[in-house]
Image: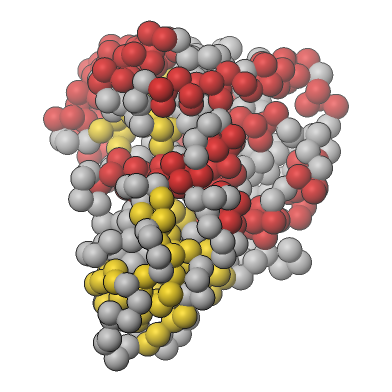
Amino acid sequence: MTRRSLPVLALGLLALAGCGKSHEFVTPLSGQANTFVIRNVHVFDAPRAALLDGPRDILVRDGRIAAVETPGEVREAVREIDGGGKTLIPGLIDVHVHSGGSASPSWHTELPDTDENLGALLYAGVTTALDAAGLTPDVFRVRDDIRSGKKLGPRLFAAGPMFTGPGGHPVGIMRETLPFWARWYVIPRLTRQEATPDEARQAVAELLPEHPDVLKIAVDQLPIEPRIGTDVVAAIAAAGHEQRIRSVAHVGRSVDVLDSVRAGIDAMMHSPYQEEISDEAVAALAAKGIPVVATLAVWDAVERVGIVRASDFTPLEREIAKPAVLDALTTAPASWTTGTTSEMVRQLAAAHAARRRNVQKLRAAGVTVLAGSDAANLGQFPGAGLHVELAKLVEAGMTPGEALRAATSDNARFLEGETPEAGEVAVGRRADLVLVDGDPTADIAALDRIARLFLGGVELERHPRDGA
């Protein structure tokens, strides 16, 4: 199996300088106060994974939800927005993104654009995200600029570099796919290669001034990419816990899950993508209450490279993606379907149904399944990727309401604990809100039909890609 085409951040990390003017996916509406009332909307009750009975009026005051009332109860003299019987949901939350990545395949040189990726996330209604590995310290600067208001983007949490063993994932991929000048720049900024527990503890200590929100560790063995030592994983997790920082793991197989649980990892950023998860691994996760980010869609995206048709992309994907990238994904070079690449694709295709069974087994055991897209990555577009992921979770047996709960209140609690800032249409929460045309608890595709979008009470105007 080659690492050349596996979904990893390295596929989009050639942009070390500006790459032209970014497409502006969203702009704040000027002259709009962030105190208003949205009338006559159906409200998604995220903890219950269902709509509230009957329509509601939602009062937003100074960027936060001040009241959720039956129609006519809100009488304040503020700007009124007619919801027209549409459905109001909390802003979506994606707990596995790479804001510096690219969906472009390696044979089509399309430099990644962080600003475009952030705008695309917002365009798709993603108002909070966890960047699960990015160039360091750049990703922390982006996070802090968003929080301070210097940059427009979803509220961002960031892991910074990915901890791995010497030559471990994704270092081997980058050594194969990136030119020497990019390898020299990217590898030390994207990864921390640690051979011993002492080295790992020192690396964590050196990262602490950047205030990482989580620590990301690659616990996955691939050809010519040796796996990090379990004692090193345990040292990283323990060093993080001493500072009240959780660790999350990239895993590929059941053995990776078991070793990660034993080492003190707090969440899995994938379910096993190479095989059906073992009963032992499921039991270990359930016993510790460790959540799993399923990431079904990103592997499906690899499976369909070269055979996907233009009509297979969703309208939201076409509104976000560059047409040239879509074209490149539909027609792969011969090297994609021969040799070791074809072996990799065959393995992913063979595990297609197993990945869906993994979701079913985890849920049956009471393990919380979280929603994350792993975008931007090969064939997986920022923002749109989360919508595709939710559809895949429904395909795997979740109800639409359960999938939507995973991408709202469950993800919010994972990021911020029992009293998060967002994730619910409830009094006191941030007014990160998405108004959609239809009922997403009946049809998850209704999420794609976004009518209005609010970030911290500020309405954003949405602009699809030119020519979409």
**Residue 73 point in image, percent of width and height:** 28, 79
**Residue 312 point in image, percent of width and height:** 76, 45
In the rendered image, which quarter contains the C terminus?
bottom right
User: In the picture provided, is 210 more to the left or to the right than 175?
Assistant: left
**Residue 447 point in image, percent of width and height:** 55, 56
Q: Residue visible at 34% across and 47% down?
A: 48
Closer to the camera in the image, 458 or 395? 395
Query: Residue at the front extreme?
Result: 53
Instruction: Name which quarter of the figure residue 417 lies in.
Output: top left
User: In the picture provided, is 197 more to the left or to the right than 372?
Assistant: left
In the rendered image, which quarter contains the N terminus?
top right
Q: Is residue 139 visible?
A: no
User: In the picture provided, is 69 more to the left or to the right than 177?
Assistant: left
Instruction: Name which quarter of the figure residue 108 lies in.
Output: top right
Closer to the camera in the image, 77 or 93? 77
Q: Residue visible at 71% across and 68% down?
A: 466
**Residue 366 point in image, percent of width and height:** 34, 25
Q: Is residue 191 above or below residue 111?
A: above
Q: Residue visible at 56% across and 25% down?
A: 356
Q: How many marks?
A: 0
Q: Is residue 367 visible?
A: yes
Query: Residue at the left extreme?
Result: 242
Q: Is residue 320 above or below residue 195?
A: below
Closer to the camera in the image, 275 or 143? 275
